[in-house]
Image: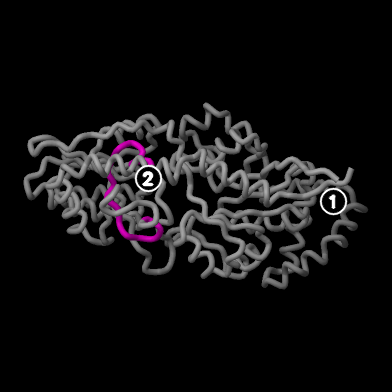
Amino acid sequence: MCKEETKVLVIAPNFPAINQPWMDTYLEQLLIFGMPFKIFTKNGNSKVYQQKVDDLSLRDHQMEFSLFSLMGFLRLTARPVQFLKSITKHSALAKEFSGFGIGYFSSLCKIVFFSGHEKTFHGITLIHSHSEILAFEFSYLASLKVIPLIVTFHGLPPSGVDQLDPKKRKLLYSVAKKVIVNTKFARNQVVSLGCASEKIEILPQGLTLEDFDYLPRRAPDRDQLLELLTVGRYQKDKGQAYVLLALRRLVNSGALVHYHLVGVGDEGRRRLEKIVSSLHLSGHVTFHQDLSSDCLKDLYHQCHLFILPSLSSKDKSHEETQGVVLQEAQASGCIPIATRVGGIPECVNDQLDSILVNDRSSRAIYSAVTYLMDNVGMWGLLQKGGRENVENNFAAERIGYRMNKILKNSSERTLLR
């Protein structure tokens, strides 16, 4: 008997992606801990992504594979005897899946399909999915090959984005060996979705501190420009509209202020641009899209205050489970103002390294900014506290060490020689 080397099949909804730096950090940690991996993604043709992807040659690990390809079926049907044996062999497994409300024929097709890609997945000892929907699809492979499946739950998708059907989710969490979440808030979400609590591990998303120089800015004088920053998708649940309303209040009060928005999403950006125009704030706002990692770091150092105005969910869909951009801001020395939503209050400390406010309130954001401008003596303590918060709780090497243990422990299998 001997232990197999852990080789991870990483399931990423988008890779590479400009707005998912946490994935690059996670893959970097796999490299650091010497854990071989392959990456499957449905959207792998992006030309805009973080420089780290090329620096670490992460694209070299991508798999050429499509869930919607017919090649697996063609390989099997080209050999009729093996095809019939495969149907007989996997029929029982298909029946087991159909017990969760998934159609027998549909389950059998997926099982046969994955068995037709035998060589593609050779040597994989662990599947780690960062998407519920893709994790469900690969639960068939996990069951077929008896490969442990880990799911990292990044929160429910925003309203209007496809969610996993409850019956499929029940199957997924019955098959999954571990479910990783980043906060207690996310843990409670997953438990409410039917996942057994003993399967859940709380592990925040980490940040590579070497990528973020600590360069805090001093508070500007009243006759100097105050620069604000938000980083997040251009969608309503991110709450940027409330910052724009607060900005109008600040301008009306005579403040010299400029607001930088960094994000993705053309439709959402057009909506925000209309709000800027209606509030006559064009000279006070700059939109940024597809920024390189170096340009984003420069903005963190250029701006004084970072605002994360995420909204609570009215339809029990997406809420911020961590907000990695908060850690990026704190690591850089930019003071966060954030809403008390989702897992955010677990990740920053009000009045010690950040200012927390109620969501859906432009007045609360305005008051927080003016409070900080009236109490510039707090800035050094908040900035120092922010950097220490990231170093103590979110440093990539700390998170990577714990992640490495979870993956290795979850993939423990023995191989007969």
Q: Which residues are magenta?
A: 328-344
Circle 2: is it few (<14), some (14-19), or many (20+) Cα within 10 Å?
Answer: many
Q: How is the image coloured?
A: one colour
Q: Which mark is residue 385?
A: none
Residue 307 % position (x, y): 28, 48
Q: Earlier in the sequence, mark 1 or mark 2?
A: 1
Residue 208 % position (x, y): 46, 36
Q: Residue at x 26, y 33 (%)?
A: 302
Residue 396 % position (x, y): 49, 40
- Secondary structure, mark 1, is helix
Q: Quadrant of residue 245?
A: bottom left
Circle 1: is it few (<14), some (14-19), or many (20+) Cα within 10 Å?
Answer: some
Residue 21 % position (x, y): 46, 40
Q: Which mark is residue 77?
A: 1
Foreground of the two, 194 or 101: 194
Which residue bears the numbered disc 2?
389
Q: Are marks 1 and 2 in contact (CB under 8 Å)?
A: no
Foreground of the two, 369 or 73: 369
Foreground of the two, 120 or 23: 23
Q: Amino acid at mark 2?
A: Asn
Q: Amino acid at mark 1?
A: Thr
Foreground of the two, 28 or 118: 28
Does the stretch in magenta take in 330?
Answer: yes
| Side (left or right) of 31 relative to 376 | right
